[in-house]
């Protein structure tokens, strides 16, 4: 089973998010955080978290890029519990047991995004507010033979040709 960990190429996430995720922590989309947001909520660092941030499941901070990697069953189980505990602490769910199914759905959504990707594939998320609610779209950036360190050296990911 594949999931994704936070990855940083530079210090920009430290400056653009109120609470940046820690490099290497497991991440999920975390779009649920924005379910009751309106245009008035989308300012400054909150807008950045909404627009492009994955949610780290250790710090519950945000990160711009995540890298796909294998997750062990025990880590997957611990992740579900961590998300369920977050739902109790931050959103008033009655108990971890009550929140566990929704938490599992959130983690499985991320597994579905990652499962058919090669290890080290980078993912980015883009969100927009629509009349129907929050719309998420995802971009996959395939790993290069040169290794992940080459992304940071050559600058913008958007300008590089995509090779297979």
Image: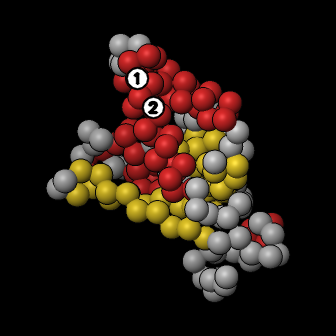
Q: Nearer the viewer, residue 100 or 126?
A: 100
Quarter of the image where one finds residue 35: top left
Q: Kindly identify which residue carries mark 2.
A: 103
Q: Is residue 48 visible?
A: yes
Q: Is residue 91 above or below residue 156?
A: above
| Front one among 88 and 40 | 88
Contact flag, marks 2 and 1 (Cβ < 8 Å): yes
Figure label count: 2
Instruction: State whether residue 17 appears in this view.
Output: no
How would you rate the neighbour count of disc 1 (Cα within 10 Å): few for under 14, some for 14-19, many for 20 or more?
Answer: many
Q: Position of residue 10 (x, y in %)?
A: 71, 58
For the point 63% across and 41% down, the residue is 26
Residue 38, x across and y down, in percent: 24, 46
Q: Which mark is residue 99?
A: 1
- Dot 2, how many residues are within 10 Å of its Cα: few (below 14), some (14-19), or many (20+)? many
Among the 4 quarters of the image, the one containing residue 56: top right
Q: Is residue 135 left or right of 138 when viewed as pictured?
A: left
Give the left or right position of residue 158, taking residue 109 as reference: right
Answer above or below: position of 12 versus 28: below
Q: Secondary structure at mark 2?
A: helix
Tell me which corner region of the image, top left, top right, bottom left or bottom right, holds residue 128. bottom left
Question: Which is more toward the observer, 18 or 97?
Answer: 97
Q: Residue furthest left?
A: 131
Q: Secondary structure at mark 1?
A: helix
């Amino acid at each position: 089973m594949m999931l994704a960990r936070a990855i940083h190429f530079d210090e920009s996430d430290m400056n653009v998010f109120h609470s940046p995720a820690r490099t290497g922590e497991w991440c999920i989309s975390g779009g649920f955080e924005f379910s009751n947001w309106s245009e008035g909520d989308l300012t400054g660092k909150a807008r950045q978290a909404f627009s492009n941030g994955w949610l780290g499941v250790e710090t519950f901070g945000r990160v711009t890029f995540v890298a796909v990697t294998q997750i062990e069953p025990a880590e997957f189980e611990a992740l579900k519990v961590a998300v369920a505990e977050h739902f109790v602490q931050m959103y008033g769910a009655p108990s971890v047991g009550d929140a566990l199914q929704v938490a599992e759905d959130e983690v499985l959504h991320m597994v579905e995004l990652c499962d058919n990707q090669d290890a080290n594939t980078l993912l980015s998320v883009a969100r927009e507010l629509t009349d129907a609610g929050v719309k998420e779209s995802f971009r996959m950036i395939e790993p290069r033979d040169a290794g992940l360190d080459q992304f940071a050296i050559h600058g913008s990911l958007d300008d590089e040709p995509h090779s297979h």
